[in-house]
Amino acid sequence: MLLNLHLEYGLVILLSLFVSWVFISIPFYFSGKVMAERSTMTKAMAASLFVVIAIFFFSLIPIIGTVIGIIASIFIISVIYKISLIRAFFMAILAVVFYFIIMLIISAILGLGLIILWGFRVPGL
């Protein structure tokens, strides 16, 4: 029974990691469509995976590591999408913008759902 329970938790963790990976890849896909004109979801998923890994490992270096991680991310985007470094830089900025837009939309949808659930009244008032 205990082994079965741990297996279920492991599957839930793997599924949530995969869903998060796909979710993070969506801004890369849209920014790739704008900047590279030949973006696929596979390229977006590869780029997001390698960028997250690069930023994680370089951020372990104090102070300068984050800057090195961002520069490495631009190089990764440039290589995967076969575009110049300038276009990769703007693609990274555009991916961040798309990410915030998607988060704003999801927050608005969830916030509206909570308002409807609470019956259009503010809790505590």
Image (spheres, rainbow, N blue to C red):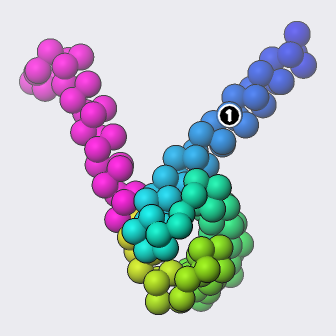
31 horizontally vs 41: left or right: left
Residue 80 at x, y percent in the picture? 65, 73
Task: Name the image quarter holding residue 57.
Answer: bottom right
Q: Give the range drawn in magenta.
A: 97-125
54 horizontally vs 67: left or right: right
Task: Name the image quarter holding residue 83.
Answer: bottom right
Identify which amino acid the numbered label 1 is placed on.
Leu
Residue 104 at x, y percent in the picture? 29, 49
Residue at the spot x=47%, y=89% of the render?
86
- Nearest to the observer: residue 24 or residue 31: 31
Residue 20 at x, y percent in the picture? 58, 45
Dividing the image into 4 quarters, which one contains the N terminus? Answer: top right
Residue 46, compared with residue 114, is above or below; it is below
- The answer to whether one can see residue 57 in this image is yes
The chief SS type of the magenta part is helix
| Label 1 sits on residue | 15
- The answer to whether one can see residue 55 in this image is no
Residue at the spot x=59%, y=40% of the render?
19
